[in-house]
Amino acid sequence: MKLLIAMMSHETNTFSPVPTPLTRFGNGSAPPEGEQARSEISGRALAMGGMLAVAEAAGAEIITPIAAGAPPSGPVDDSAFEYICDLICEQASDCDGILLELHGAMVTQSLEDGEGTLLSRLRQRYPSMPIGVALDMHANLYPAMVDNATVITGFQTYPHIDMFQTGERAARALLASMRGEIRPVTRWGNCPMLPHVMRQGTDDMPNRALQQRAAEMESKQAVAVSLFTGFPHADIYNAGLSVVVTTDNDPALAESLRDELLEMAWSQRAAFVYEVTPLADSVSSATAAASRPGEGPVILLDHYDNTASGGSMDTTEVLREILRQGLDDVAVFAIHDPAAVAEMIAVGVGQDVTVNLGAKFHLDALAQQSAPLTVSGRVRLISDGKFVVTGPMSTGALMNMGPTVVLDTGKVQIIVITRHVEPYDLGCFTSLGIDPLAKRFLMLKSRIHYRATFKPIAKDIIECAGVGVCTSDYNQLQFRHVRRPIYPLDNINSASLSQGFPQDR
């Protein structure tokens, strides 16, 4: 048995100004191919890692054309997409099956559905090829994804700490199908709703209950059950919440389970709406929170500018308000500003410097723009920005922040980086000589993934609405392509999806 196992993963924020060339799919260079791809991914807490583990245990011959995973950003360059697709399609010619770690929310310069396009091309070239796919929970499902895959599995945790297990689920189901042990039948559908990302965490309701029910269905009744909360910052037709169910030759059961989850999600649609607090009020409440008894830092979450949702990671409004209100003993991760990093490296460690920080990207999708922040301080540390993740998300991955500087104002230590990295591991501080547990405040540019390691150590968490293309205020964005009506952009009051709302089944 010969299996092709590969990765093509990107969450596209169509409002993001950050470009997505091929080099973004590597660690600042071209993504790994062939045996290098296999060696870099094997054993890592990624879906492709889980697929490799199952295939190796089954004694399969394995080829790995490419492991291309890019941090979220704007639409993928067509040339990058074509390069990745061509490698995968060409090398599958003499394989018995295919396993793919995709994302499910890839948009290119020309295509709304990158994953569906890849799967369609594979199916056209290899009509009977078994294909197993693992998707992110934020997938925006399209018919071409479902129609051209044998089985689909999705993450069931957010923060995504089950990526490896999701790859295992896809691989086991595909191998069972190839052995003739099951006959996969898949049904899917979507809801006319765009859940706010800040309400999608699986330690929060209602998504906790939805994912628990999906896992229960899969363990007792089906081959695979996945509820995708969707990625709302993709202005594409099928953005939003969806469900896909695969059973063993039982289409009626697949439809019943699908409809139960869709109705369950629809009934809780109001709970997926995020309410915004004014920035000055949020920062002020952080000061009060720090004064209360208890251990650990107070986290100020700059969630409008999260790079793992396509944010530029260089807006300055939350940091500006922290400085204006005089918060003391703060560590900030991070401001993306390669020019400021180069300027501070030239000055050197221990030297005083004044820099204009941030706001290098113009946010074309927004009326409100960020502004550069003039900051004076001392260069405390210069680093190559590399560390290995030890926390529960992407365990073992080499994180590369690029050349990195810690700028100390006396009250605030600002980490300035040259590559986009979300703070979901303590190493983003500890690798730079900062103990996050010893700080009074931490400012993080994150939305939900920070919870994997920072929530357990936090005294309190204050969500701060700054500026950025990950805004939780849909009124700041112009949706031109998403299907309408859709909640909460439109006031849909029907109690049930069956009352006239189509589902792509």
Image (spheres, rainbow, N blue to C red):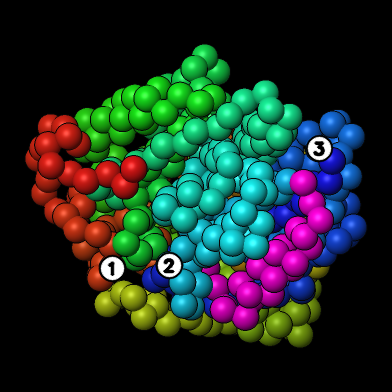
Q: Which mark is residue 83?
A: none
Residue corresponding to mark 2? 112
Residue corresponding to mark 3? 55
| Snapshot quadrant of residue 142 | bottom left
- Depth check: 264 or 470 in front? 264
Q: Is residue 417 above or below residue 55?
A: below
Say which amino acid is labelled 2.
Answer: Glu
- First reached walking from the N terminus: tag 2 or tag 1: 2
Q: Secondary structure at mark 2?
A: loop
Q: Is residue 290 above or below residue 86?
A: above
Cβ atoms at labels 2 and 1 below 8 Å apart:
yes
Q: Secondary structure at mark 1?
A: loop
- Which residue is pictured at 25% across the width and 70% down the height? 480
Q: Residues within 10 Å of mark 2 (few under 14, many from 20)?
A: many
Q: What is the CA distance from the residue labelled 2 to the residue labelled 1?
A: 10 Å
Residue corresponding to mark 1? 481
| Snapshot quadrant of residue 242 | top left
Q: Secondary structure at mark 3?
A: helix
- Which residue is pictured at 75% across the width and 67% down the height? 90
Q: Is residue 228 magenta?
A: no
Q: Position of residue 450 (x, y in %)?
A: 55, 44
- Which residue is pictured at 89% across the width and 45% down the height? 61
Q: What is the CA distance from the residue labelled 3 to the residue labelled 2?
A: 31 Å
Q: Which residues are magenta?
A: 73-96
Residue 32 seen in the current view = yes
Q: Residues within 10 Å of mark 1 (few under 14, many from 20)?
A: few
- Depth check: 409 or 232 in front? 232
Q: Is residue 84 magenta?
A: yes
